[in-house]
């Protein structure tokens, strides 16, 4: 396996992927050597389904607690066809499904426990059974306390809240986080998110945080929309009042036939109404201008969003073409390497043995 990794220049930190395949004690007798061979064969069958293009070593063990037969599958990271690494993150559900299919096909017992959101090792379980301190449980509780705070609605706020508790959050890939802190016993601890359980993986945490942020934004948008409706209604009512006043003035000018004294009084009243109308128009002008600016701003924002989506689609198409070209180039290069290796290791390739010459320079 090491030689294969060297050939494909796959020298990352993760060299192999380990999978544990367990069976019920009622299905196999751990004292029967024939059962050992059967369990090992089931491990080979699972390995072919999980990673058919990878090197896999299958070891059959008997655990020391319940004396149950189980397999350890070590999957070498490079793919023998492409040289790419085995994508092992979030692959547990697929592996469990394949293992259950094999178990069911051979008439064996299926696991009855439900999937757990937390991944606990045997050592953790034994410490918990003895009521001893488990630092991973302590870490889970502190992460849960931050996620239970509804005001935390962004990844930045999540990291800062944990930092205030003495827990440092480190990015370790697309869906992997590392939590580092000093436990209650004063020891430095580190745990990757998938070691704590599915609920602590970055994808799950960010999904919940984004959901909270969207919910908060939606509430803010609703309040803005309601305010616009209220402003529009107030403007319409004021306009109706203005129209009614103007009609009253016109009717007064046509139909009024009073004395000079009454006419003077009516003229004065009319002037007062005109002044009020002018003041009203002046008062509502900033409001009307603000509404128009708001509409223009919304239209501008809509245009920017459309332009952004268009640019993103163009970038995505370019990235896909670039990725396809690089993959094709990589495959061609690997094929040339394999052809060269085949020629070098071909049995028809012989070296020419030169005749023996003594140091005196004379041939024999």
Image (cartoon, rainbow, N blue to C red):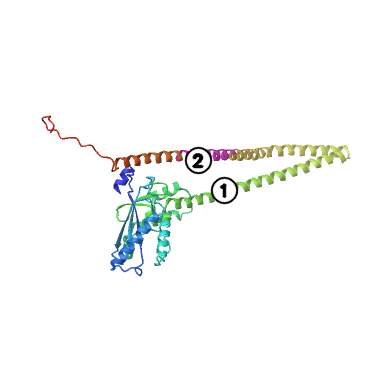
Q: Dots 2 and 1: beta carbons under 8 Å?
A: no
Q: Nearer the viewer, residue 130 or 285?
A: 130
Residue 85: say if magenta.
no
Residue at the disc numbered 1: 220
- Which is nearer the N-term, disc 2 or disc 1? 1
Residue 342 is left or right of residue 284, and the answer is left
- Dividing the picture into quarters, in which one does residue 284 lie? top right
**Which secondary structure lies at badge 1?**
helix
Q: Is residue 326 left or right of residue 296?
A: left
Residue 25's x, y, as percent? 34, 68
338 lies above or below 188: above
Instruction: Report the magenta residues as a range.
Output: 303-323
* Image point (38%, 39%), residue name: 333
Asked if residue 319 is among those painted magenta in the image, a careful observer would answer yes
Is the residue marked by circle 2 packed among few (<14), some (14-19), or many (20+) residues within 10 Å?
A: few
Taken as a whole, is the magenta stretch helix, strand or loop? helix
Task: Please state, as top left, top right, bottom left or bottom right, where the C terminus lies in the image.
Answer: top left
Report which residue position mark 2 lands on. 316
Residue found at the very far bottom of the displayed protein:
26
Q: Where residue 59 appears, x then y in whole percent?
A: 30, 58
Q: Residues within 10 Å of mark 1 (few under 14, many from 20)?
A: few
Q: Is residue 73 visible?
A: yes
Q: Is residue 67 visible to us here?
A: no
Mark seen at residue 78 = none
The number of numbered badges drawn on the structure is 2
Find the residue positioned furthest to the top: 361
Q: Nearer the viewer, residue 198 or 23?
A: 23
Image coordinates of residue 357 in percent, x first then y, are 14, 33
Q: Give the percent coordinates (x, y) of residue 344.
A: 29, 40
Label 2 secondary element: helix
């Amino acid at each position: 396996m090491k030689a294969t990794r060297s050939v494909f220049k796959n020298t990352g930190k993760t060299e192999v992927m380990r999978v544990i395949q367990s069976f019920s004690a009622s299905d196999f007798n751990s004292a029967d050597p024939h059962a050992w061979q059967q369990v090992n064969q089931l491990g080979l069958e699972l390995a072919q389904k999980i990673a058919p293009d990878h090197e896999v070593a299958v070891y059959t063990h008997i655990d020391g607690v319940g004396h149950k037969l189980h397999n350890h599958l070590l999957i070498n990271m490079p793919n023998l066809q492409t040289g790419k690494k085995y994508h092992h993150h979030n692959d547990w559900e697929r592996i469990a499904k394949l293992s259950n299919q094999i178990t069911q096909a051979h008439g064996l017992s299926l696991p009855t426990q439900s999937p757990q959101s937390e991944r606990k090792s045997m050592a953790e379980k034994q410490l918990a059974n003895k009521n001893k301190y488990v630092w991973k449980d302590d870490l889970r509780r502190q992460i849960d306390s931050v996620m239970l705070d509804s005001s935390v609605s962004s990844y930045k706020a999540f990291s800062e809240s944990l930092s205030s508790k003495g827990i440092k959050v480190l990015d370790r890939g697309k869906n992997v986080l590392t939590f580092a802190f000093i436990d209650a016993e004063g020891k430095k601890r580190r745990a990757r998110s998938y070691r704590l359980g599915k609920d602590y993986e970055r994808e799950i945490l960010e999904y919940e945080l984004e959901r909270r942020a969207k919910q908060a934004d939606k509430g803010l948008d609703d309040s803005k929309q309601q305010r616009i409706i209220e402003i529009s209604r107030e403007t319409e009512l004021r306009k109706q009042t203005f129209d009614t006043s103007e009609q009253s003035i016109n009717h007064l000018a046509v139909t009024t036939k009073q004395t000079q004294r009454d006419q003077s009084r009516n003229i004065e009243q009319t002037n007062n109404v005109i002044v009020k109308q002018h003041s009203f128009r002046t008062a509502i002008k900033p409001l009307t201008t603000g509404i128009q600016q708001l509409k223009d701003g919304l239209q501008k924002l809509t245009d920017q969003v459309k332009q952004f989506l268009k640019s993103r689609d163009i970038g995505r198409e370019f990235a896909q073409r670039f990725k396809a070209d690089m993959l094709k180039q990589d495959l061609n290069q690997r094929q040339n390497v394999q052809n060269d290796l085949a020629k070098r290791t071909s049995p028809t390739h012989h070296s020419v043995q030169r005749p023996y010459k003594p140091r005196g320079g004379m041939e024999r």
